[in-house]
Amino acid sequence: MKTVTTTLPEEAAAFIKCGGIVAFGTETVYGLAANVFDEVAIAKIFEAKQRPADNPLIAHIYDLVQLNDLVTNVTESAQKFIDNFFPGPLTIVLKKQDRIPMNATAGLDTIGVRMPNLDSTRRFLRLCEVPVVAPSANISGRPSPTTWQAVLEDLDGRIDCILKGDPTQIGLESTVVDCTGKVPVVLRSGSVSIDDLRSVIPETIAVSGDTSDVPSSPGMKHKHYSPVARVIIVSDAADAISGHRNAYIGIDDVPDGFSIKMICRDVAEYAREIFEFLRECDRKGIRTVYCQSVSDAGIGTALMDRLRRASED
């Protein structure tokens, strides 16, 4: 398969209409899209990404008018979050319509839905003429792609098209909140923090762990975000060990002696740059990456979640 790269959303959307799979940029990370109602196209996503079949996908819409095509009922909590955070980096989980193929939801009776906040993204989604499912556009387990070049690096020859765009603004995947029960439950942390959600619904809680065989959200069960290099989290930058083929990223500066280092101005920049930094480390043959920990608050919660998962053996 030849992977087409284009800056034209019309050209990219044409592949979706023909049952193809297309990578496209959002404010969070680059996603890999297929028609949400096309079981065969959805299967292509799992094959291209080498993604476990028990890892559900998130649907993306350009307008709320599409929501009723995907879910049976918008709960009161979901409506409140929609009113406050759509469009944006928040995914809400609701009961799905029967016409959505089971491979999109890993056999679950629920589906996550979000509306990206970039005008360019929603234009592409509108041109697709159907909602799409879209996990991150990378080989499963690898750091998520925040540039179209990173998508090409992983999926060249495995997908139909890449819609080229700017690097992503946030750099971490969306927050996922289950709105099917009496109390909203955060399944995956992101730039919309639990404090943000609690400002709308104070009873919102964070999941304490997923004990089911099938995770109810991406990012809960399988190894994610991992480079080839070993990732070590350090609370104090001074604990990072310099040396040939060692790298460092964090807020606090460290002495020279690392093959690669990145000093971030704040946690938001750290979150935006972490995945591309990990990829760059792999490109340059880095063996060990030292990542400074940050406060577990705001987007720092999401960043620490990704760092912990990247550091798992």
Image: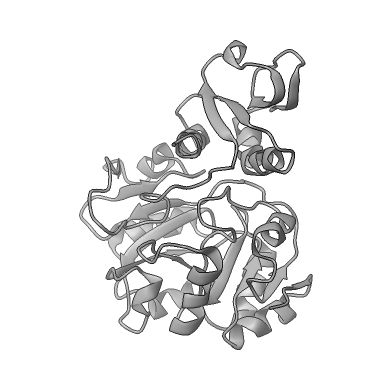
The picture places residue 74, in percent across and down from the top left corner, at 32, 68
Residue 152 visible to the viewer: yes
Looking at the rendering, which quadrant does residue 305 occupy? top left
When the figure is inspected, residue 7 is found, relative to residue 129, above or below; the finding is: above
Query: Residue furthest toward the left?
Result: 182
Q: Is residue 295 left or right of residue 265?
A: left
Q: Is residue 62 left or right of residue 209?
A: right
Looking at the rendering, which quadrant does residue 33 occupy? bottom right
The picture places residue 263, in percent across and down from the top left corner, at 71, 25
Query: Residue furthest toward the bottom?
Result: 18
x 63%, y 33%: residue: 270
Residue 74 visible to the viewer: no
Q: Quadrant of the C terminus?
A: top left
x 54%, y 64%: residue: 49
Q: What is the basis of the colouring in this image?
A: one colour
Number of numbered callouts drawn: 0
Q: Quadrant of the N terminus?
A: bottom right
When the figure is inspected, residue 232 is found, relative to residue 201, above or below; the finding is: above
Which one is nearer the viewer's eye here, 108 or 186? Answer: 108
Looking at the rendering, which quadrant does residue 68 occupy? bottom left
The picture places residue 89, in percent across and down from the top left corner, at 52, 53
Which one is nearer the viewer's eye here, 72 or 207? Answer: 207
x 55%, y 32%: residue: 231
Q: Is residue 311 left or right of residue 73?
A: right
The picture places residue 109, in percent across and down from the top left corner, at 27, 70
When the figure is inspected, residue 182 is found, relative to residue 245, above or below; the finding is: below
